Amino acid sequence: MAASHFTQVMRERNYRLFAVGFLASGMGLQMMTTTILWEIWLATHDALSLGFAGLARAAPVIALALVAGHAADRHSRKAILTVTQCGFVVIAVAFAIASARGASEWTWYALLVASGGIRSFNGPSRNSLLPLLVKPENFESAVTCNSGIFQASAVAGPVAAGLLLGAGIPAWIVLLASGALILVLAIIAPRLEPREESRATVSLTLGSMFEGMSHIWRERVILATLTLDLFGVLLGGATALLPIYADEILGGGPALLGWLKASPYLGAFVMAVWLAARPRLANAGRALLFSVACFGLAIVIFGLSPWTWLSLVMLFASGAFDNVSVIIRHTLVQTRTPNHLRGRVSGVNSLFIECSNELGAFESGLVARLFGPVVSVVSGGLGTLAVVGAVAWAFPQVRRLRHLVSEEPQPPTS
């Protein structure tokens, strides 16, 4: 996407409003997550407890993803986005109260389960709403811009939380500040004016919920990208163990945790800016496989690194390479899915993402408990490299994929 494409999409009122709210909300959610992980680590000093935090976030999304996707197709996506953003604000306040009162570890897990339930509905509605906020010819540009905005918020959020906690600011104040930032998108969402709002007429049945999964099964390229993300990140994700690296391996504190957590997103932001200044990807499939392989290699080096500077560089590189696959996957999912199925397909996409990120956190914590954090991270990175080879062999369509937008989305059906 050339600079002119960025200018073009930012001229659209809907996207400008959405971008402001998305930036603030993303920063708030990242502040909240960083603070919660640090609180759990301080309370337990147990890698498996960090893994359970990921499991608590993932379980409701896995259980509700298909229902949430159906809801995004049947009801107003804008309304669902507004309600769920308000729900996040309530959760942030509840976390602040729990922190101020010194609540038990299980209270934190219960709130994480509640936040996961909200996320299960928030993601499909937000993702499937985006194509309706911009002109069709600007959608790929909007995806790249959105990625950059998310990465910027994901850099600012952990760094801000880490610096505030490191300066002695109580965690409950940081959590309230995160809730205030999340509230911005809740205020903005009702002002968005999508071109059309989906109203699927089908009833909530087992068949209708699985229709999005059936579409993905038919679209083999989408299936391949989701499979690559699922197993690659599930094995190679190291974020759940960052409190251990910050505290015990690299000898830092909450401020270092903030920088460690922010580094992948900083790399992803730089990659998004670089991609925004270039023409659209011409060999998307090969770029996808290469980027995920480099992600796995960076995780291996991070796991072995005894130096803070090298750890930060490798996390930066992992985020940069991972963002290539994020942009490719999201563009394929939305442009190769008809509007009346976008919510359900986004629900399946959320299911894959949660399985990879949060179940990956549980897997990392479990292996770290048994064999130590270094073995957990390094073995996961090597597993990612094996997944790349398996997907390249099993899905030759990926190797042959050149352009992301090869066909127009089908028109909605009643």
Image (spheres, rainbow, N blue to C red):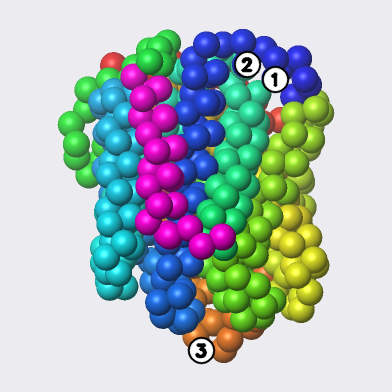
Sequence-first tag of 3 and 2: 2
Q: Amino acid at mark 3?
A: Leu
Residue 142 circle label: none
SS class of the residue under badge 1?
helix
> Dots 2 and 1: beta carbons under 8 Å?
yes
Separation of marks 1 and 3 at Cα, in angstroms: 48 Å
Q: Residue furthest front?
A: 168
Residue 413 visible from this viewpoint:
no
**Magenta residues, as a range?**
167-190
Answer left or right for 313 relative to 111: right
Crowding near pointer 3: few (<14 within 10 Å), some, many (20+)? few
What residue is disc 3 on? 370
What residue is disc 1 on? 6
SS class of the residue under badge 3?
helix
Q: Quadrant of residue 153?
A: top right
Q: Residue at x 76, y 78 (%)?
A: 306
